[in-house]
Amino acid sequence: MNWIFLFFAFLIGISNAVQSGVNAQLRESLNNPILAALTSFVVGLVVLGIAFLCFNQHPVPGIGDFKQVPWTRYLGGAMGAFYVLTVIFIIREVGPANMICVIIAGQMIAAMTIDHFGFQGFAVHQITWPRVAGAVLLIAGVYLILKN
């Protein structure tokens, strides 16, 4: 396994936790949770636009190509919006550590299910007893963190 990819995954985890607090602060500054989420996505859109202009090496599909994409493949944006908006609403109530723990538990259960069945075109990775034990330990860790 390429360690640089794991390092970037670790950085994603850090940015995920920091992003939650930054977006909560934006909500307080704007006094509007939905506008804070929208603003966060507009900033993200600008960053992605710059990245696209600077680094894109693939041909740009035409409008007809976008129309042929199954609608379900556009749900990632809706899920991202759900994530950001929900975090903005709940982070002050549950705290970042508790929130991230429960998110990770949900991610692990969903990821293991996706792996097991090979959903979304992923290679199949069967649920095994060691994987189940790891998930149980993770959920036990979530319980211990939430208990305090």
Image (tube, rainbow, N blue to C red):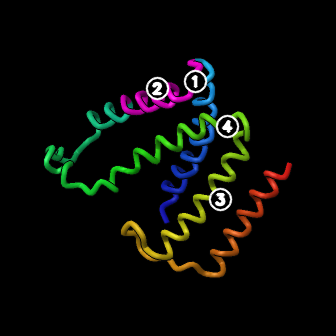
Closer to the chain start, of discs 2 and 3, is 2
Is there CB contact under 8 Å for labels 1 and 2?
yes
Q: Dominant secondary structure of the magenta stretch?
A: helix
Q: Is residue 12 left or right of residue 94?
A: left
Badge 2, how many Cα within 10 Å: few under 14, some, many 20+?
some
Query: Residue 53 or 90: which is nearer the viewer?
Result: 90
Q: Which mark is residue 91?
A: 4
- What residue did someone put label 2 on? 39
Mark 1 or 2, nearer chain start: 1
Identify the amino acid type marked 2: Thr
Q: Is residue 25 left or right of residue 73?
A: right
> With respect to residue 110, does 39 lie above or below?
above
Residue type at mark 1? Leu
- Please tell me in which quadrant of the rendered image residue 38 appears: top left
Q: Amino acid at mark 4?
A: Ile
Report the residue marked by disc 1: 26
The residue at the far right in this view is 148
The magenta stretch spans which residues?
30-46
- Please state the horizontal and vertical placement of residue 115, each as a whole percent of the image: 49, 71
